[in-house]
Image (cartoon, grey):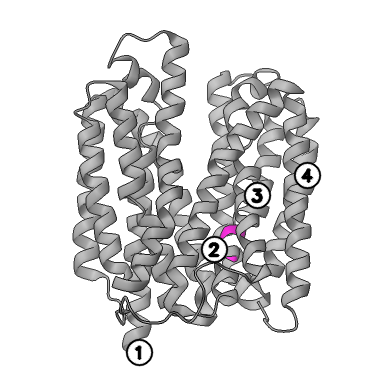
């Protein structure tokens, strides 16, 4: 028992650091992506922005489609081999991006990165299986904090490295970091896995029919929508506010960063609270607090007040995703098929990453930027109500 206790903690820190590196590699290109694509061919400024959007979104779209498949294979063959596969796939794709000669090649490579990748979702599945029941929320909180840390460090590191070593070399350095993932995962991750035979009769149907599972999946998409809705219009929002003495671009970057910082700080705390008071209950409270904090953002005129509200919103919503993952583990009792459900959850997560910016941009284009906050608050409130209904449904049979 003590050996298993040590093993799951080692797995957590290896996959946590691996998830951090994976997200750094995926976001390190963001500061210079348009400039890099422009260097690969003759494109108008508008064409470059379109290509940038397509290249950036391609990974999330393909990853959403393939996440359930990798989850299913994790159930059958184990999570460790899936993590190694994802690391090797990312290593190849990121290295080839540094050798790309056209925007089309970058688009194809980003699509392949989504297909071949999946390290963070694999880490989530592994810890959902390996972490003790009483520490499930904490484990998911640590993973989510590492992912958020990677999303903060990636763009900053990319901007620094591209200025000092060149854009192409950034991709090669990213490949080197991912190679560390391959080695560490192969040598340090330990997994207790009993291989399932292909002709074995499953104990559950492949499609989740429990209403609580659908509540958690829909809430996962809603959470990402609430977090990312203002990302494509943040420059316009900040430009209309008092942001002296900061430049508009710098102020916009800080607004996004403080949101992620608040989320990072709350991920560990809310994960622990979920273990103590129930994951669905904490998630419902986080959604409700987030909705309350989003509404006044539509009316502020100072970017510094907006930063404070976004930081507080990050604190409210940042730990919700680990709570949703933990509640999903409790709701789906068939541990042998847990990877399939966690993979489906990752697909809904990626769906939110696509729908969030899309919703924010469309609402701002039709009604104005201030209405984006109103719609986003309505999404968060709807998720809070949905979680409350799910909590009432599960109270008689599931304490989480």
Q: Marks 1 and 3, Cα distance to the nearest angstrom?
A: 39 Å
Q: Position of residue 259 (x, y in %)?
A: 59, 42
Quadrant for residue 358, please give it: top right
User: In the rendered view, does 169 fall on the left or right side of 396?
Assistant: left
* Label 1 packing within 10 angstroms: few (<14), some (14-19), many (20+): few
Q: Marks 2 and 3, Cα distance to the nearest angstrom?
A: 21 Å
- Look at the numbered disc 1 and give the secondary structure of its residue: helix
Q: Examine the rendered structure and indicate whether residue 389 appears above or below residue 164.
A: below
Closer to the camera: disc 2 or disc 3?
3
Q: Position of residue 9 (x, y in %)?
A: 37, 74
Circles 2 and 4: CB atoms closer than 8 Å: no
Residue indicated by mark 2: 268
Q: Which mark is residue 378?
A: 4
- Look at the numbered disc 4 and give the secondary structure of its residue: helix
- Look at the numbered disc 2 and give the secondary structure of its residue: helix
Mark found first going from the N terminus, 1 or 2: 1
* Label 2 packing within 10 angstroms: few (<14), some (14-19), many (20+): many
Image quadrant in which the N terminus is located: bottom left
């Amino acid at each position: 028992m003590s050996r298993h206790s040590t093993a799951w903690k080692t797995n957590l820190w290896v996959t946590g650091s691996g998830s951090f590196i994976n997200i750094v590699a995926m976001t390190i290109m963001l500061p210079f992506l348009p400039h890099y694509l422009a260097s690969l061919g003759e494109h108008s400024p508008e064409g470059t922005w379109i290509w940038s959007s397509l290249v950036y979104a391609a990974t999330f779209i393909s990853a959403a489609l393939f996440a359930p498949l990798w989850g299913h294979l994790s159930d059958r063959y184990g999570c460790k081999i899936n993590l190694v596969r994802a690391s090797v796939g990312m290593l190849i794709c990121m290295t080839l991006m540094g050798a790309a000669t056209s925007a089309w090649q970058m688009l194809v490579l980003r699509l392949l990165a989504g297909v071949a990748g999946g390290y963070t979702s694999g880490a989530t599945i592994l810890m959902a299986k390996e972490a003790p029941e009483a520490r499930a929320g904490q484990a998911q909180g640590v993973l989510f904090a590492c992912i958020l840390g990677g999303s903060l460090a990636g763009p900053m590191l990319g901007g620094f490295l591209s200025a000092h070593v060149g854009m192409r070399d950034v991709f090669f350095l990213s490949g080197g970091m991912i190679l560390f993932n391959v080695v560490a995962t192969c040598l340090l991750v330990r997994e207790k896995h009993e291989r399932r035979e292909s002709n074995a009769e499953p104990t559950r149907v492949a499609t989740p029919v429990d209403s609580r599972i659908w509540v958690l999946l829909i809430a996962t998409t809603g959470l990402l929508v609430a977090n990312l809705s203002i990302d494509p219009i943040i420059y316009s929002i900040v430009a209309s506010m008092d942001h002296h003495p900061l430049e508009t671009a710098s102020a916009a970057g800080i607004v996004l960063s403080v949101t992620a910082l608040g989320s990072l700080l709350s991920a560990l705390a809310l994960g622990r609270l979920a273990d103590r008071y129930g994951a669905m209950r904490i998630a419902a409270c986080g959604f409700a607090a987030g909705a309350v904090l989003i509404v006044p953002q539509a009316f502020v005129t100072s970017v510094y007040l907006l930063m404070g509200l976004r930081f507080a919103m990050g604190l409210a919503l940042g730990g919700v995703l680990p709570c949703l993952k933990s509640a999903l583990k409790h709701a789906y009792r068939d541990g042998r098929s847990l990877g399939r459900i966690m993979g489906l959850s990752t697909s809904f997560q990626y769906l939110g990453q696509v729908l969030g910016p899309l919703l924010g941009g469309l609402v701002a284009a039709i009604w104005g930027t201030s209405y984006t906050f109103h719609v986003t608050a309505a999404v968060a409130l709807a998720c809070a109500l949905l979680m409350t209904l799910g909590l009432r449904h599960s109270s008689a049979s599931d304490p989480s």
